[in-house]
Image (spheres, rainbow, N blue to C red):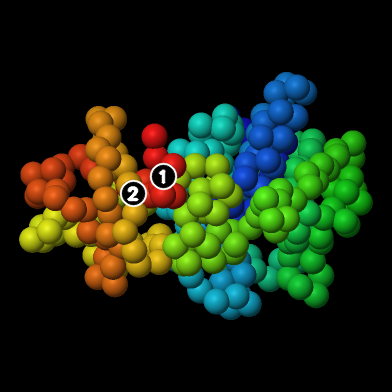
Amino acid sequence: MILKDVPMVVSVGVFDGLHEGHLSILKRVKEIADFNRMESLVIVFDRNPKMAAKSVTYHDQLMTDRQRDELFASLGIDHLAIIDFCPEFSKLTGEEFLALISGFCRLKAMVVGEDFRCGVPTSSVGSVQLPEHLNRLSPGSFVEIPPFVLTEDGEIISSSLVRKKLLEGALEGVQSMLGRPYTLDLVSITPISALEGLLYRTESFNQLLPNEGVYDATLGYADSREVDLVAHVMAEGVLLSNMAESDADGISYLSLYAKGSRT
């Protein structure tokens, strides 16, 4: 399919963790697309632009690309574009970035967060300026900016806040902000057999691990089986108690639950 001929509702972002704030944007993308008989496109980056520019401290991601892609698919997003955030791309102005998007699809609408900003800092485009720029590049298009989603304490839900709570071991807050348990992708990781169970070494993960502690967990297999158990997060890695090496075949994920929330 040639996307240049397809009327499209677009969103752009890092979408690390796909928390409730992200989900409110993506669900609105889908609603607008369905109502107007358009298709939906989400644009992400192969690395976090702020980390690539070293404007924020490096950190492991909250979900793997595989998990992200599966969640996009479950939301009914039609198309996913992944941009190589190379040095050349990082030098684009906001106007040039938006021109790039409008050049490979019939951009009819954009849905972004209030904190949206694209382009190099000296000539970037934020959510306030976006409608003017977009209408010039794609006349008749429009922009929607859903409000921030807040926690019960009135904090803005963000990937940074999810990360902070995770490192504190506060899974109640993490689970509330994600709308689901925090889940480690184990598909590509091979555990080692330890005296106490199966150990997934820390260095094997490219996802952020929670604070050291003991957590209620559910282990999922590729054949849809699930096993409730206790997971020990330690400096060495994640230990699944009382699991034998023979139990490792087909393991897909490990969901970590806030205490008392696993049903």
Location of the C terminus by quadrant is top left
Percent of width and height locating residue 256: 38, 49
The answer to which of marks 2 and 1 sits earlier in the sequence is: 2
Q: Mark 1: which amino acid?
A: Gly
* Image vertical order of residue 123 relative to residue 244, above or below: below
> Is residue 230 or residue 104 the one in the foreground?
230
Mark 1 and mark 2 in contact (Cβ < 8 Å)? yes
Q: Quadrant of residue 195?
A: bottom left
Q: Mark 2 points at which residue?
A: 216
What residue do we see at 63% from left, 77% from top?
A: 55
Q: Rounded to the nearest whole Å, what is the CA distance between mark 2 and mark 1?
A: 8 Å
Q: Residues within 10 Å of mark 2 (few under 14, many from 20)?
A: some
- The answer to whether residue 52 is left or right of residue 65 is right
Location of the N terminus by quadrant is top right
Q: Name the residue under label 1.
A: 260
Q: Looking at the image, is mark 2 or mark 1 nearer the viewer?
A: 1
Q: What element carries label 2?
A: strand
Q: Which residue is situated farthest in the front direction here?
A: 260
- Asked whether residue 103 appears in the rendered view, the answer is no
> Is residue 214 or residue 186 the one in the foreground?
214
- The answer to whether residue 131 is left or right of residue 230 is right
What residue do we see at 14% from left, 55% from top?
A: 197
What residue do we see at 77% from left, 23% from top?
A: 36
Q: Mark 2: which amino acid?
A: Asp
